[in-house]
Amino acid sequence: MHESLELLADSGYQGLSKLHAKSQTPHKKPRKGELSGEQKQSNRELARRRVVVEHVIRSLKIFRILAERYRNRRRRFSLRFNLIAGLYNYELGLG
């Protein structure tokens, strides 16, 4: 992975920080303990940033290119994916 990328992950990727310096995962509640107010706030901030990306992925899965196995020519995958992303951006008014 590129060093300048910032990774936002859910709690299933707890060991990711060992592999990538700019990764962020939510804090886990310690056994028989509680999270501090700062940790809870950090988890909320991370969730707010991640939910935007999750909604975009859900929207792209409607086109089935990400939801199922791609069975067409591999060299055309990026072209088709970029066209779908362009349609999505056009609907948002970004294009």
Image: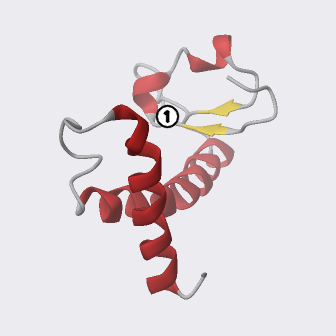
The three-letter amino acid code for the residue at tag 1 is: Glu
In the picture as drawn, the residue positioned furthest to the bottom comes out as 93
The residue at the point 61 percent across, 40 percent down is: 36
Between 30 and 81, the one lying in front of the other is 81
Q: Is residue 47 left or right of residue 2?
A: left
Tell me where residue 38 appears, x and y as whole percent.
68, 46
Between 2 and 8, the one lying in front of the other is 2
Tell me where residue 74 appears, x and y as whole percent.
36, 33
Q: Residues within 10 Å of mark 1 (few under 14, many from 20)?
A: few
Between 30 and 58, the one lying in front of the other is 58
| Numbered disc 1: secondary structure | loop
Q: Is residue 6 left or right of residue 86?
A: right
Tell me where residue 59 appears, x and y as whole percent.
32, 65
The residue at the point 54 percent across, 61 percent down is: 48
The residue at the point 49 percent across, 34 percent down is: 34
The residue at the point 51 percent across, 36 percent down is: 9
Tell me where residue 86 appears, x and y as whole percent.
50, 70
Q: Is residue 24 left or right of residue 32?
A: right
Task: Tell me the quarter of the image containing the C terminus.
Answer: bottom right
Q: Which residue is mark 1?
A: 34
In the displayed structure, 67 sits above or below 92; it is above
